[in-house]
Structures are given as C-alpha cells and as structure tokens.
Image (cartoon, rainbow, N blue to C red):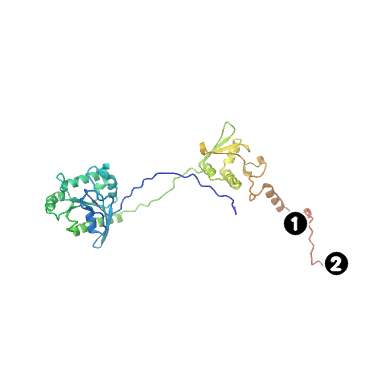
Amino acid sequence: RRAPGFALLGEPGEKRTLVLELKSVADIGLIGYPSAGKSSLVAAISAARPKIADYPFTTLAPNLGVVQAGEARFTVADVPGLIPGASQGKGLGLQFLRHVERCAALVHVLDCGTLETDRDPVRDFEVIEDELKKYAEDLSTRPRIIALNKVDLPDAKAMADMVEPTLKKMGYEVYQISAASRIGLEQLLYAMAKLVAEHRKQESELEKVRIVLRPTPIDDVGFKTMANDDGSFTVIGSRPERWVHQTNFSNAEAVGYLADRLASLGVEKELFRLGAKQGDEVRIGLGDDAVVFDWEPTIEAGAELLAGPRGDDMRIPRGWEKFDEEAIDQLDDEELAQQWEYKVEDPTDPGKEMEEQK
C-alpha cells in the first residue's frame, strides 16, 4: 500500500457526564466553627490574603498558605467553617470536609471570644470531632493540636485559661494564640512543623506501592457467524463490527481492505462453511447499527466462486494481469524470442559490414 486511496473512519464516540471534585492538598488543615479566626490565622502566618469579615461563612473555598517555621516549610489550608450536621451536608459541610482528607495533621481553631451563650471551646471541639468521625473514620487518627484563639480579649483569655487543663487531659497539645495580635504564633508554628516533619518521616519509611495501569482486556478475537432462515447470514464480533464502522463503503479500495481483514480473521471461511454463496446478504452486527451488504468473497476464501476481480480501483491488480505477469516470468529467453519473433543483430558483426559494402 505505497499510495493508499482511503482512510479509516472514526468509531462512534461516547458521551458521559463527569462530576469532578477538588480536594486541596495541604500539610496542615485548620478546622473549626465559622468565625473562629481560621482565615485570620492563615493571613498572619503566611503571605496568603483571604477574605476576612465579621460574619459566618466568609470563606467558601479553602485558602492555601505557605508557612516557614525555621528551616521547615509546609502548606496550611483554611477549611471553611464546620457546623453540627456537616457530615450530612448541612451548611455545605460535605463540600468543606473533603478538603480535610488529604491533610497530614489538623489544627482545631477554637473561638474563646464567642458571644453565643450555648457555645464554649470544649463543646465546639467535641462537635467538630464528632463530625469528622462521622465523615471518615480515619480522620480520627490524624495527629492534631488545639489553638485557643482570640486570647487578646479579656474575657477570651479567662475562657482559655479555664478550658486549657480540660483539653490537655484529653491528650492534646494546647496553645493560646491571637491571630490578630500575633500572640503565641511562633510556638504554634513550631508545633505544626513538628507534626509535618514526623509525617514526612513516616512517609519516607513506607515502601512505595508501584502502581501498574493495565488496559481492560477486550475479546478482540472471537466472532460468531449465523445462518438466518431467510437465506442471509449474520456476523457478530467486536472486531468485525468495529471494522465495518471504520469503512467508507463509497471507496472500492476501502471495501476491498475490509474484505481482506475479514478474510484474515476467518469470517469468510465460516461463511463458506455455512453455505454462503456470492451475492448472498451478509449482516455484520445487530439492530440499527448493523451493516448489510451483498457478499463478494475474496480470492483466498473461494476462487472457484468468483466471476471477476474484486473492486474497480485502478491501483488494485486484476487477477488476469497478475496471472500474465507470472506466466511471462516463467518463460526463458528462447521461448520469448520464438513467441514474439524476437531477433537481435549485433552491430559489431563484420559480416554485416561486408553486406552493406556490397
């Protein structure tokens, strides 16, 4: 096929609706109630400049910040505020909780200056912990520390001093901070850096699993040929059905190429075995996608049934042309000379010069 006069057509496409969910990748996730000061903390410890306001749910998407603590460098994500029922989707909780899944450690930012009478830092901590456990069990095993925020306010400082012993008895590291006044931030940053360093050390010690992607195997060899009651024949198979969809039936060379492929697969031998004859109706596929045509077998499959060459493309050698070329190749020089009355005169023959002089 030095100069093919056709191209395979494309296969029918697929249409799908995909829902893609973004999960932020950060070393530390800041979690807590709305207006606990998480965005203010990110702005205070990094170059990030999230939107900060004095009303709940100011943050609707995670804010990422890069933090430098000594020689340690890590990322912090400000997860939008969580409320009771977040694990069931209340307050867009599911959209917020998914950003916590990839964090190596968590920092509870507790509001010690809240004016709501039914809330206190310990209660807020327990509610958020319960929502994390309901959302994903493995989140309860993540290392975490507690930051009691807004201690620059007099009443908040008193509240922090009161709840700190209770939280420490639960086994957590507790730090009193103020994101606005930058109180206690240095100690908190080094505590974060320690958690990140421990996590990275554990990750390096774990043996990395080699991911091998293998394509889904497809039955590309098998096919089934059936004889129908009306005298037609049906061929079913992934490869024959794909090939007919790739064929431009208005191009004789493309049709011939399809016939060659079907013959090499063994489809024509099966049709001969079932009693198919030249001109019989053959259907490849089922239903509305089936392709129906009158069968014209190739030379390899059944030469005795052919009335003439396949196709009318000038680049396809005709059967008789091929036969004549082979027959000529089998004749020796003497037979060719006799057949065509071939006579060679040697111009250097002296006898010829003498005759010309006479």
Label 1 sits on residue: 333
Q: Is residue 352 left or right of residue 296?
A: right
Label 2 sits on residue: 356
Residue 309, located in which quarter of the rendered image?
Answer: top right
Q: Amino acid at mark 2?
A: Glu
Q: Position of residue 23 (x, y in %)?
A: 31, 50
- Label 1 SS: helix
Q: Residue at x 74, y 55 (%)?
A: 332
Rendered view: 346 above or below 325: below
Q: Position of residue 153 (x, y in %)?
A: 13, 54
Give the total number of marks visible in the rendering: 2
Contact, mark 2 vs mark 1 (Cβ under 8 Å): no
Q: Residue furthest top?
A: 229
Rendered view: 194 above or below 257: below
Q: Is residue 287 left or right of residue 189?
A: right
Q: Is residue 214 left or right of residue 177?
A: right
Q: Amino acid at mark 1?
A: Asp
